[in-house]
Image (tube, rainbow, N blue to C red):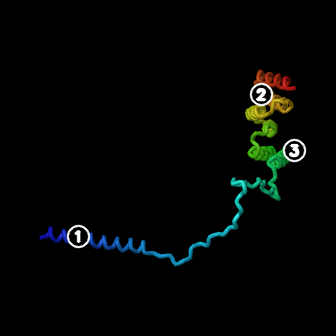
Amino acid sequence: MLEFVGDRWRTAVRGIVLVGLTMVLAACGGYTRTDRPADVETRSETPPPTDGRPQIAAYKPPAQPKFAKPAPKRAVEVLMRRSSDQQRAGDLDGATVSLERALRISPDDAALWNRLAEVRMAQQRHALVVQLAAKSNALASANDRDLRRRNWLLIAGAKRAMGDASGARYAENQAAASR
């Protein structure tokens, strides 16, 4: 008898679930829209081309903006000038910060790397001077002999200050060859 009651109960629950699902689905499917559809844009009719091929309009370049952003070169120049002023005033840390900001704007500028090496030489950071001047030499163009010579002289001075006489002589020879 208990088995008979259990089967009836299961059947009743299934029926209730089925009726509930049917009502939910009927509610979703029976929804009607009361708002109007969007208005369709009307366009004027263009006459078809006479030869049967589509015509392409001529290219019109976009208008130039009225206010152009300042070029990064100008910002770099301002930061270099600030660095020079700070170095003359004895603020070597401030000069370093200004040059590092300029390098974030223009990381491939060999002259900036040279200036930073000069400031680091004034701070007596000789190992760093060698690295910075070498980076400047790597970025310098082949025909910028003056910059390369100044970099080699910085390397020679830093090597001499670190006690590397042979490295200093080599750098001086490279500077002489850069003339």
Q: Nearer the viewer, residue 158 or 79?
A: 79
Question: The residue under label 1 is which amino acid type?
Answer: Thr
Tell me the distance, in whole angstroms, between the alpha carbons under discs 2 and 1. Answer: 95 Å
Give the structural element (helix, strand or loop) at label 3. Answer: helix
Question: Which of label 1 and label 3 is nearer to you?
Answer: 1
Q: Position of residue 42 (x, y in %)?
A: 66, 69
Q: Secondary structure at mark 2?
A: helix
Q: Are marks 2 and 1 in contact (CB under 8 Å)?
A: no
- Measured Cα–Cα span from mark 3 to mark 2: 25 Å
For residue 164, side relative to residue 150 (left or right)? left
* Residue 126 visible in rendering: no
Residue position for label 3: 88
Q: Residue furthest bottom?
A: 34
Assess disc 1: are there few (<14), some (14-19) or many (≥20) residues with their C-alpha within 10 Å of its C-alpha: few
Residue 26, image x, y percentages: 39, 73
Query: Callout 2, which amino acid?
Result: Lys
Q: Mark 3 packing: few (<14 Cα in 10 Å), some, or many (20+)? A: few
Q: Between disc 3 and disc 2, whose residue precedes?
A: 3
The circle on residue 67 is none
Residue linked to disc 1: 11
Disc 2: CA contacts within 10 A as few (<14), some (14-19) or many (>=20): many
Marks 3/2 in contact by CB < 8 Å: the verdict is no
Res. 163 image quadrant = top right
According to the picture, the residue beneath numbered tag 2 turns out to be 159
Residue 85: x %, y % from top left: 86, 47
Identify the residue at image location x=42%, y=72%: 29
Report helix, strand or loop for mark 1. Answer: helix
What residue type is disc 3 on?
A: Arg
Which quarter of the figure is the C terminus placed in? top right
Closer to us: 138 or 38: 38
Mark 1 or mark 3: whose residue is earlier in sequence:
1
